[in-house]
Structure formats: structure tokens, C-alpha cells
């Protein structure tokens, strides 16, 4: 995390664990392995039927109401104006300006519960989509062929680099420049290519849409909202190479965030100059993403050593067919890494909002109030971290197995999944080690 937010991230070390680290790793790996063998024994056909959702007619009418949609758009625009206003015209000190906390905590971390609980609501409130829609055109340019989701991957890589590798990422002026530049690029592209751009090019909207696949709310074939099995919604994820890159980037960046907390890493990099810091952290981020991507792609392609049913794999091959299984893992990693950070630093976003422009105001009457660090114990935090990682990987195993049941013949089903199981166990053990080791 950026310099301002560094001390508030994580649980502090393995000494906070309610159980020994080795026991946590072995138990979590065993839970994933046992889940796999149980599924292999009792789950031989795909079961995630998207058409099995329960239609929510009244809620659909409420959500599709024009007034509500206008309110959501207005709220999105107001949030963007407040963020840019505070970043450009507020205090130059990260400790006094709410903009960094609003961006890195309220938006980046807040997307997770918002999308899981409410589905693709970000699309409705996205201020960049709203602004681009004001420039009405009779026709739009066609998106370049083969572009997939790579623009969103590129934008997300830039944001994560700013968060994890750039030493001044918490400076309000840096936040202002990034958000302004990001908004201008996406609004311009939205004007040229139309609403289709935001589905593949706006990193935050694409990320929110990926998370929303695991929401219990989704749209049925008739366009109505449905209450569904979240894993059934997850199974509908597009099988595109860009999505593979996006999920591997998310997992790899979170892994690097954990590595950069290790005392061994901080000892080695603590005395680096500014340029050296940027180079070393950039290379570290790239290596972490590359390792995660190589492990997943290798596992998926090795799974392909077993004969796949004809016409069952899309353009992205087996990595694209199984990439949806990385979504709950990515969420588990994010919860593990950002839970305590969000609970503590998120309070700061409220406290600083009482004087967003550094004028000595006290709009919310919270002046002088401090963050309450006592309401969460280290044992609870460690439990949430480990539980999130294990649950995410178990759901990942279930999702991958259901897809394998669709792709492979029954007699090949168990053997085909051994490489993916090995990758899942490695991700589980590595994730727990990253969030707990000091």
C-alpha cells in the first residue's frame, strides 16, 4: 500500500495467529484437497444452471425505475466531483486530505462488498459512463478487433503500480493527476466508441462486473433480476484472454503487496533511493504477477493433456475456460489483505470528510476524533484473513470442478484436474503465508 497507508495494513505478523502458521497452512491446504476429492466422488455432471434463478419482479421494477437510475448517476457524479475537488484543492498533506483514502479504501476496496451484495450496480452509477453519455452521437466507431479486455488490464496495471510501486502514490496531487487523466481517457474513449467501451476499457467497471458475477443477483434471459446461485452467475463469465490477464494481475499484485510487508523485504529495500525504490518495486510487482500467471496457465494447459470434448473450449483455451475459478480466490486474497486496513483507514475517510478542502471546517462534527483501533482484535482479524482465503479457494475448486465436469468425460474427470488442484493448494498455502508471515 502507499506510504501513508502502510502502517495500517495487515495484522502485523505471525505472532497474531490463533494457531501456529504451519498448522494454518496445512489445514487450509487439506481443506482444499478434501473438497476436491469429495467433489470428484459425488459431482460428475455440471450443475450450475443459470436459468434456475428465481425471478424478482418487484425489485426489477424498482431497480429499472428512471428516478432511481438518475439518483445513482447523480450520486456517482457527486462522488467524482468531491474526490477531484479534495485532491486538487484540499490540503497537500496526505494525513489531512481525504482523497487518497477515498480512492484507495472507499473505492478500490469498497467495490468488493458493493458488487457482491448489489450486483453490477457500479455500471449504473459510473460517472465516466454518465459524462460520456452526455455527448450524444448517432453512431460510434467499432472497437478494434481482438481488443478483448486488454485496455482494462492496462489501466488496472497503472493503478496498481501507483498503489504498490510509486512511493508518492498517496500524495493528493498524484491522486488528482491520476484520477483526472484516467477520467479524461475513458470519457474520450466512451464518446468515440460508445457505451461498449466501458464494458472492456474502464478498469474499475470491468473489475466491478467481474466481482458481480459472484453476486446472488443477476439478470435472466428475460431481462428481469433474479435471485440465483452465485456460482451459477460466475460460470457465465466471458472466456477471453484479457480476463485471464486481469485475474492474474489482481492475484499477483496482492501477492506482491504481501511480500512487500515482509521484514526481509523492508530490510533490503528500506535504504533505497527514490529511483531505485521505483525500479525494484516495479520489478517485484512484475515478477509476482508473472509467477501467478505462469502457475495458473501451466496448470490449466496441463489439464488439457486429457482429451477435451470437442468445441467445448473458447478462444482463450483452457485458461479462459477455468479463469472464473480465480474470482473467489481473488476476492479471498483481497479480503485477507485489506480487511483490517479498510476497517481502520476507512474511518479516516469519514473523519477527514468533515474538512475536505482543508479550510478549517467541521461539517460532520467529527473534528478531533481519532481512529478507533480497539474495536477489532488481532485474533478476529487473523481469523477473517485465513477464513477468506480458505473459503475463496474452496469456492474456486467447486467452480473449476463444475467446469471440468462440462469439459471432460466422467472417467477422465479426476485425473484431468490434478494440475489445477496442485495450483489451488499452492495458492492457498502461499496466500496464508503472505498475510501472516512477518
Image (cartoon, rainbow, N blue to C red):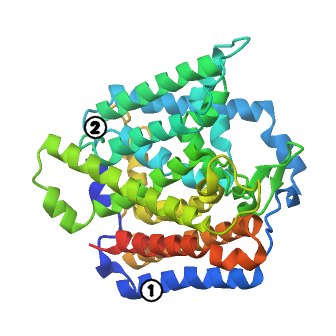
9 or 38, nearer to the observer: 38
140 or 110, nearer to the observer: 140
- Asked if labels 2 and 1 touch by Cβ distance under 8 angstroms, the answer is no
* Label 2 packing within 10 angstroms: few (<14), some (14-19), many (20+): many
Task: Determine whether, in the image, residue 279 is placed left or right of residue 338.
Answer: left
- Residue lying at 64% horizontally and 73% vertically, measured from the top left: 416
Task: Name the residue carrying label 1.
Answer: 26
- Residue lying at 35% horizontally and 27% vertically, measured from the top left: 177
Q: Quadrant of residue 9?
A: bottom left
Name the secondary structure under disc 2: loop
Counting from the top left corner in percent of width and height, residue 281 is at 25, 50
Spatial CA span between label 1 and label 2 = 41 Å
Task: Determine whether, in the image, residue 234 is placed left or right of residue 271.
Answer: right
Q: Residue 171, which numbered label?
A: 2
Position of residue 275 relative to residue 82, above or below, is below
Task: Determine whether, in the image, residue 183 is placed left or right of residue 161.
Answer: right
Amino acid at each position: 500500500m502507499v506510504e501513508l497507508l502502510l502502517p495500517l495494513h495487515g495484522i502485523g505478523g505471525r505472532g497474531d495467529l490463533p494457531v501456529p502458521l504451519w498448522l494454518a497452512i496445512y489445514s487450509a491446504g487439506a481443506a482444499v484437497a478434501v473438497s476436491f476429492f469429495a467433489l470428484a466422488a459425488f459431482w460428475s455432471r455440471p450443475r450450475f444452471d443459470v436459468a434456475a434463478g428465481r425471478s424478482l419482479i418487484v425489485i426489477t421494477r424498482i431497480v429499472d425505475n428512471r428516478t432511481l437510475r438518475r439518483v445513482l448517476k447523480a450520486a456517482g457524479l457527486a462522488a467524482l466531483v468531491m474526490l477531484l475537488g479534495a485532491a486538487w484543492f484540499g490540503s497537500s498533506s496526505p494525513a489531512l486530505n481525504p482523497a487518497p483514502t477515498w480512492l484507495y479504501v472507499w473505492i478500490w476496496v469498497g467495490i468488493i462488498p458493493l458488487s457482491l451484495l448489489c450486483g453490477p450496480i457500479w455500471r449504473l452509477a459510473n460517472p465516466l459512463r454518465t459524462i460520456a453519455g452526455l455527448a450524444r452521437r448517432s453512431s460510434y466507431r467499432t472497437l478494434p478487433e481482438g481488443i478483448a479486455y486488454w485496455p482494462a488490464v492496462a489501466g488496472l496495471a497503472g493503478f496498481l503500480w501507483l498503489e504498490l510501486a510509486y512511493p508518492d502514490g498517496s500524495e493528493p496531487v498524484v491522486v488528482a493527476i491520476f484520477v483526472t487523466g484516467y477520467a479524461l481517457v475513458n470519457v474520450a474513449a466512451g464518446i468515440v466508441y460508445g457505451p461498449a467501451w466501458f464494458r472492456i476499457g474502464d478498469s474499475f467497471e470491468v473489475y466491478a462486473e467481474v466481482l458481480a458475477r459472484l453476486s446472488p443477483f443477476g439478470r435472466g434471459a428475460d431481462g428481469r433480476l433474479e435471485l440465483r446461485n452465485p456460482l451459477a452467475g460466475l460460470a457465465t463469465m466471458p472466456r477471453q484472454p484479457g480476463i485471464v490477464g486481469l485475474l492474474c494481475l489482481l492475484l499477483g499484485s496482492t501477492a506482491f503487496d504481501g511480500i512487500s510487508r515482509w521484514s526481509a523485504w523492508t530490510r533490503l529495500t528500506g535504504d533505497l533511493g527514490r529511483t531505485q525504490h521505483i525500479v525494484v518495486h516495479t520489478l517485484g510487482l512484475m515478477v509476482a504477477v508473472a509467477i501467478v500467471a505462469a502457475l495458473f496457465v501451466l496448470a490449466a494447459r496441463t489439464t488439457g493433456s486429457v482429451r477435451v470434448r470437442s468445441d467445448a473450449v473458447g478462444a482463450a483455451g483452457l485458461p479462459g475456460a477455468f479463469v472464473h475459478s480465480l474470482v473467489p480466490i481473488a476476492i479471498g486474497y483481497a479480503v485477507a489483505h485489506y480487511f483490517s486496513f479498510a476497517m481502520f483507514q476507512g474511518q479516516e475517510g469519514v473523519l477527514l470528510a468533515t474538512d475536505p478542502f482543508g479550510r478549517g471546517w467541521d461539517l460532520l462534527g467529527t473534528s478531533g476524533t481519532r481512529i478507533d483501533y480497539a474495536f477489532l482484535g488481532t485474533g478476529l482479524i487473523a481469523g477473517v484473513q485465513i477464513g477468506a482465503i480458505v473459503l475463496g479457494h474452496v469456492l474456486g475448486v467447486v467452480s473449476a470442478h463444475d467446469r471440468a465436469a462440462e469439459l471432460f468425460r466422467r472417467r477422465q474427470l479426476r485425473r484431468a484436474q490434478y494440475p489445477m488442484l496442485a495450483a489451488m493448494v499452492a495458492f492457498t498455502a502461499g496466500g496464508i503465508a503472505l498475510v501472516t508471515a512477518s
